[in-house]
Image (cartoon, grey):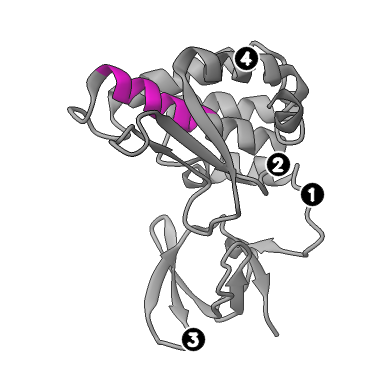
Amino acid sequence: MKAELNKFLPANSIDTVMRWIQSYQFQLTIAKARSSKLGDFRPPNPKKPYYRISVNHNLNPYEFLITLVHEVAHLLTFDEYGRKVEPHGKEWKNQYAALLQETIQLNCYPTELLPAIQAHIQRPGASSCADAQLARELRKYNVDPIPFQLLEELPASTQFVIRTDRRKRLFKKGARLRKRYRCVEVATGKTYLVSPVAEVVEMN
């Protein structure tokens, strides 16, 4: 497991993550790329009586670690409160902030990334993607042979596909509505609200 994790995580974080896995007794799965989420947490059930966490395989090491921290915070919150609190309520935010601070002490993040992480701790959301500034900074560490941009960088009416969408649906960029852009799926005419920092490939 340790050798496998070395492929996905910053080197200085490996021992801490191994300790989490042993202490909190969860199964960690390296998942295929998913367009709808970066990771997830599943509580025990009759068929699988143990905690399960998955994280997408295609994340850069810092995004992988932050996503894992996000899901471990869900585990600890569930372990203490069950379903009595909101998934991203104050109880989860406290756990998440504490775990992120723990990883900062490991000196596993680039110095240039730390201000965005510290700011994120003050306003954690449903995913790192929901924090536009953190998503922009994390993007700088991606290694991806496919050229892509952020949705906010495209001109209005540009057609694009979302990089992680396995169905490769074609969208047309519309107006910005507060925090997201209204985009139309070309084939169906359905409207979707898409994050400004969604990674997209422009289609000519």
Q: Which label's residue is closer to the chain start, 2 or 1?
A: 2
Asked which quadrant contains residue 46, the reply is top left
From the viewer's perspective, is the residue at label 4 or at label 3 nearer? 4
In the displayed structure, 69 sits above or below 165; it is: above
Q: Which residues are magenta?
A: 69-80
- Write down the residue under mark 3: 186
- Residue 143 bears which disc, if any? 1
Which amino acid does the dot numbered 4 rest on?
A: Thr
Mark 4 → mark 3, Cα distance in angstroms:
46 Å
Q: Which label's residue is closer to the chain start, 4 or 1?
A: 4
> Where residue 164 sits: x, y (%)?
60, 62
- Write down the residue under mark 2: 60
Q: Secondary structure at mark 3?
A: loop
Residue 72 inside the magenta-drawn segment: yes
Mark 2 → mark 4, Cα distance in angstroms:
18 Å
- Residue 16 bears which disc, if any? 4
The overriding secondary structure of the stretch rendered in magenta is: helix
Which amino acid does the dot numbered 2 rest on?
A: Asn
In the displayed structure, 152 sits above or below 167; it is: above
